[in-house]
Image (cartoon, rainbow, N blue to C red):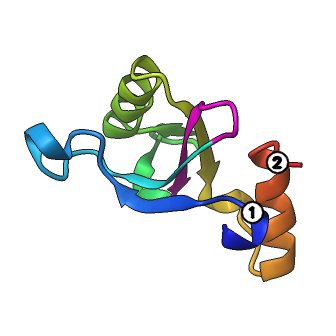
Amino acid sequence: MTELGVKWEMESCPFEKHYGNMLSIDLKFERKNGQMVALEFNGPSHYVKEVGTDIEEENGRTKFKRRILTKMGYELVMINWREWKSDAELDLEFLRNRLKLD
């Protein structure tokens, strides 16, 4: 993220002062306009499959986290593990596009 010109915080928890490390955010940063952005990398454990199909859906905890962070005013960017590439340069370009960074 530093390569993208963003000062970020890793494994940050907006509830830490009151509830401990509940629902920590993978990466968070503040845009120049003051908008807080929460970036979540969602691995396979964030999804459930519909029985008898290959249809994946976010699990309840992930849906809950999405709703809470959105209500708190975060711009939420969630990246499905299947979207992530292994090449670091491609990953930076991918993030730059997903985060709408110039």
Sequence-first tag of 2 and 1? 1
Q: Which disc number belongs to residue 101? A: 2
**Where does the image place residue 16, in percent across and percent down from the top left?**
18, 47
For mark 1, what is the residue? 5
Q: Label 2 to label 1, Cα distance in Å?
A: 9 Å
Q: How crowded is mark 2: few (under 14 residues within 10 Å), some or many (20 or more)?
A: few
Q: Which residue shows up at 66% across the image and 40% down it?
A: 31
Q: Which residue shows up at 87% across the image and 63% down it?
A: 93
Q: Which residue shows up at 19% across the image and 53% down it?
A: 21
Q: Which residue shows up at 48% across the image and 22% down it?
A: 73
**Where does the image place residue 97, in percent across and percent down from the top left?**
85, 49
Q: Report the front residue among 26 and 63.
A: 26
Q: Do the residues labelled 2 and 1 touch (CB within 8 Å)?
A: yes
Element assignment for label 1: loop
Q: Can residue 44 be seen in this view?
A: yes
Q: Is residue 54 visible?
A: no
Q: Report the front residue among 89 and 52.
A: 89
Q: How crowded is mark 1: few (under 14 residues within 10 Å), some or many (20 or more)?
A: few
Can you say whether 66 is above or below 45 in the image?
above
Q: Does the magenta stretch include residue 28?
A: no
Range covered by the magenta-colored residues? 31-42
Q: In this view, does 94 lie to the left or right of 42?
A: right
Total count of labels = 2
Split into 4 quadrants, where in the image is the N terminus?
Answer: bottom right
Q: Report the front residue among 91 and 35.
A: 35
- Badge 1 amino acid: Gly
Q: Is residue 83 left or right of residue 51?
A: right
- Badge 2 amino acid: Leu
Element assignment for label 2: loop
